């Protein structure tokens, strides 16, 4: 249920609405729309609450029942694009946001070499996995906290933001068998600017809740990847878990889905058609990962262009200074040269098709 206050509603009237919600043991989330109107999302089971309960309170303009299962992240709740602030950067605003870096952080030299060209290309966010969710328990599991510290060092030197994946609530075991003293989530929340949740964890609901609780105060953006076999409804509800537990600054990131493709051509199927669907259903920024969705560096340029043309607000791309020696996902990692071409042309597409940020093509109805 969404309560729209009138334009000139007072703080006392707003408080009366909050009290009324609390008396029914429900929670709420407040957003201030572009028009200056306060909108209150009532969270919890509203099925037994009549709209009139709130309509009768002075200062309330209208009460609308949200029909979608995902509420806080829906366009119905807040029709304007949610522009997430991260430092001085706008995510989901006018400009395309580029994120690039290696699949996994490998050593100081690799990290600083890539950081250097990322900075030269003026990419605002560097990625790099310190904790890697590997399909095989025998594969390299990531450098852990040491890698994260190198990434932090790169941020200090070059001034870009950093994103890395939080793989869970466990304490990471290093290559030498030692166990880290803090949990992976605590380290990632403490040291990165954006917290990544991987495709494998999209349905770990307890974990999503913890991520939200740990980022509730800071409102640090959470980059949530779509599970490889999840429906768009499941994906939006996973984002809703994070929003409902206190942090609505969620970036939806598509990264390809599992179909019947042969892996020699594509690792997954790039779910490009999901971009306009997510933009219509939700007000959250939508990113696309052309690296994992294709699996091969020769496909990354074309899929990047298609994603931006379809309305993606950002791209997250794997790059490596020497892809042939990469410890993880070398085949899909682009070179510095390829990355610079992608950035150049993706920016052209964004500014040509969406000069003022995402807009709906003619004829789209949003609910
Ligand atoms: C990654 O970004 O390195 C990654 C493991 O991605 P995904 O969760 O999409 O597989
Ligand atoms: Mn990878």
Image (spheres, rainbow, N blue to C red):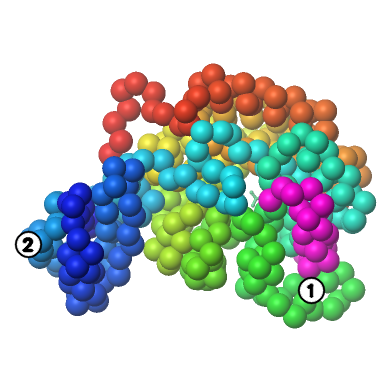
Q: Which residues are magenta?
A: 136-161
Q: Is residue 316 left or right of residue 353?
A: right
**CB under 8 Å between callouts 2 and 1?**
no
Q: Which residue is mark 2?
A: 56
- In the rendered image, residue 254, in percent from the top left (x then y), is placed at 56, 42
At x 39%, y 51%, the residue is 73
- What quarter of the picture does the N terminus occupy? bottom left
Q: Quadrant of residue 276?
A: top left
Q: Is residue 131 left or right of residue 40?
A: right
Q: Is residue 224 above or below residue 347?
A: below
- Packing grade of label 2 (10 A; few <14, some 14-19, many >=20) is few
- In the rendered image, residue 214, in percent from the top left (x then y), is placed at 54, 70
Mark toward the start of the polypeptide (2 vs 1)? 2
Q: Which residue is mark 1?
A: 173
Q: Is residue 133 above or below residue 103?
A: below
- In the rendered image, residue 193, in percent from the top left (x then y), is placed at 64, 57
Q: Quadrant of residue 367?
A: top left
SS label for mark 2: loop
At x 44%, y 57%, the residue is 248
Q: Is residue 201 left or right of residue 150?
A: left
């Amino acid at each position: 249920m969404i309560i729209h206050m009138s334009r000139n509603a007072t703080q006392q009237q707003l408080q009366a609405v909050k009290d009324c919600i609390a008396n029914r043991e429900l929670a709420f989330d407040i957003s201030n729309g572009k028009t200056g109107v306060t909108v209150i999302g009532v969270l919890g089971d509203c099925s037994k609450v009549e709209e009139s309960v709130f309509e009768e309170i002075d200062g309330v303009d209208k009460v609308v029942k949200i029909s979608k299962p995902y509420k806080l992240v829906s366009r119905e709740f807040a029709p304007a694009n949610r522009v997430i602030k991260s430092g001085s950067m706008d995510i989901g605003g006018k400009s395309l946001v580029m994120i690039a870096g290696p699949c996994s952080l490998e050593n100081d030299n690799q990290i600083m070499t890539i950081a250097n060209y990322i900075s030269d290309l003026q990419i605002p966010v560097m990625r790099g996995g310190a904790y890697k969710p590997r399909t095989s328990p025998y594969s390299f599991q990531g450098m852990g906290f040491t890698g994260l510290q190198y990434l932090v060092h790169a941020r200090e030197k070059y001034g870009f933001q950093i994103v890395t994946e939080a793989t869970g609530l466990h304490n990471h075991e290093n290559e030498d068998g030692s166990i880290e003293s803090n949990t992976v989530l605590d380290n990632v929340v403490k040291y990165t600017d954006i917290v990544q949740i991987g495709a494998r964890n999209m349905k770990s609901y307890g974990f999503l809740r913890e991520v939200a609780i740990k980022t509730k105060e800071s409102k640090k953006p959470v980059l949530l990847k779509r599970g490889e076999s999840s429906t768009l409804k499941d994906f939006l509800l996973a984002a809703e878990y994070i929003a409902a537990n206190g942090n609505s600054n969620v970036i939806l990131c598509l990264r390809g889905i599992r179909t019947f493709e042969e892996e020699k051509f594509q690792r997954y199927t790039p779910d490009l058609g999901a971009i306009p669907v997510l933009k219509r259903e939700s007000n959250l920024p939508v990113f696309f990962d052309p690296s994992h969705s294709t699996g091969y560096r020769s496909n990354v340029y074309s899929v990047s262009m298609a994603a931006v043309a379809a309305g993606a607000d950002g791209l997250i791309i794997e790059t490596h200074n020497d892809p042939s020696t990469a410890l993880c996902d070398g085949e899909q990692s682009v070179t510095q040269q390829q990355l610079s071409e992608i950035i150049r042309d993706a920016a052209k597409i964004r500014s040509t098709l969406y000069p003022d940020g995402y807009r709906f093509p003619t004829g789209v109805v949003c609910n």
